Every structure is written in C-alpha cells, then in structure tokens.
Amino acid sequence: MTSEKRRVPAGAAVLRGDITRAIRRALMHELAAVGYGRLSIEAVARRAGVGKTAIYRRWSSKLDLVLETVVAAAGNKLPALDTGTLRGDLSLLFQVVAHALSHPLASQIIPDLLAEAARNPTIDETLQQVLRAQQQEIGGRLIARAVDRGELPADTDLDAAVDLIAGPLYWRLAIARTPLTDTYLDTLVEAVTAALTADAAVPRQRDGSVPG
C-alpha cells in the first residue's frame, strides 16, 4: 500500500514566517528612520532583502503594514506583575514600561505615529483602541489585585486609576521626550501610590458613604 504525500495546491501562496518577520523588523527600523510620511514599501522591501511582491502578498498597503505591525508589537504580553503590594506592582510596571518605551525604535516611532494620528483618522482610531485595551488589561489587573488585598476600595474608579498609572510615563517619553531616571521613577511610584490610596484612608460608613 502506498502513502500519498500532501501537496500544496498549485498557485497557492505559501507565506514563509521568516520573511514575514524580516519585513516587520525592516518596517520598524524604516519607520523609526524616516517616519510614516516618508515611509515607502520599496524602502521596507530593500531593508528586508525581499521584493515588493512579498510585502503585498501579506499587506494590501503601507497603512495596513504599519498598523498590523504596530498592533502586534503593542500587544506583546508583559510579564506577571504581582509583587504582593500595590507599591511594588507599580514600581515593577513603571520599570518595565520605561525600558520598553525608552528603546531607540519606540522612542522614534511612538511620537511620529501620535503626530500622524492627528492627520489620519484610521491611525488615530487604531492606536486609541490598542493602547487603551493594553492599558485597561495591565492596569485593570493591577488595580484588581490591590482591591483584593484591601489596599484600594472596591469602588475605585478603574478608568481614572489607569489614566493616573499610564499617563505620566507616556507624557514623559512620547510627548515631552524627557529621559526617565531611577529617581524620577521612584518619585512617580510614591506619588501614584499616594494618589490611588488616598480614598482608601477616608473613613466610610457601613453603606460605603463618607460621613458628612
């Protein structure tokens, strides 16, 4: 009895993973070097060492290539941030995020895309969705653990808490573009911890209301 080998149908596109990864790497380097406005498929192809057709088999346009690659990079999972205390979790989170955003590629790409988002509604909508979802996932878990430990009240405003956690780092690195120092991070940890826990120190009645 003979066994039949499976064959890829004639004409079917086989997208090699190593080529896809090479294109994504090239895109990030090219985007950091020239910005979205001057970015071209031709330049990305040259940097990746592939033909333009290899890119167009995977993405229909420059916009699709940029958004898919950036979304994939932004969606990378952070390590578990559970140190046992709110202050410890914030300290570890700030260190991890600061390290990621301080990367030479990120420090060039993020400000450029934020500026481009003001002119391109598709980029704006995508960035808003991805960044907000990531912030909610990371910050939401951090706040939930603090609530479970009794460090924060159960009615903590999640949106406000996440904005308070994520806002200073994004402002410092993406807008002000000021280097982060260990001293600044330590100060930020103390300030955010104090702000988040301030409400927990307010005496409450059994129904959760603040005495008048």
Image (spheres, rainbow, N blue to C red):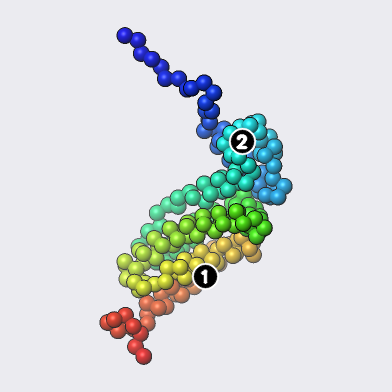
Picture quadrant of residue 209: bottom left
51 vs 91, nearest the viewer: 51
Give, as a three-letter code, the residue at label 2.
Tyr
Res. 85 visible in picture = no
Whether residue 3 appears in this view of the structure is yes
Q: Residue 111 appears at what percent x and percent y?
A: 64, 57
Element marked by disc 2? helix
Q: Give the side of residue 117 with respect to residue 10, left or right.
A: right
Residue with the most extreme right position:
38
Q: CA distance from mark 1 to mark 2?
A: 48 Å
Q: Which residue is the extreme one toward the bottom?
A: 212
Rendering quarter of residue 210? bottom left
Mark drawn on residue 187 = 1
Q: Residue at x 32, y 67 (%)?
A: 149
- Residue at x-position 55% and y-position 54%: 126
Q: In the image, 7: left or right of 70?
A: left
Amino acid type for the residue under numbered disc 1: Thr
At which x and y percent is residue 51?
65, 31
- Between 39 and 32, the one lying in front of the other is 39
**What residue is pinned by disc 2?**
56
Query: Tag 1: Cα neighbours inside 10 Å, few (<14), some, or many (≥20)?
Result: few
Q: Secondary structure at mark 1?
A: helix
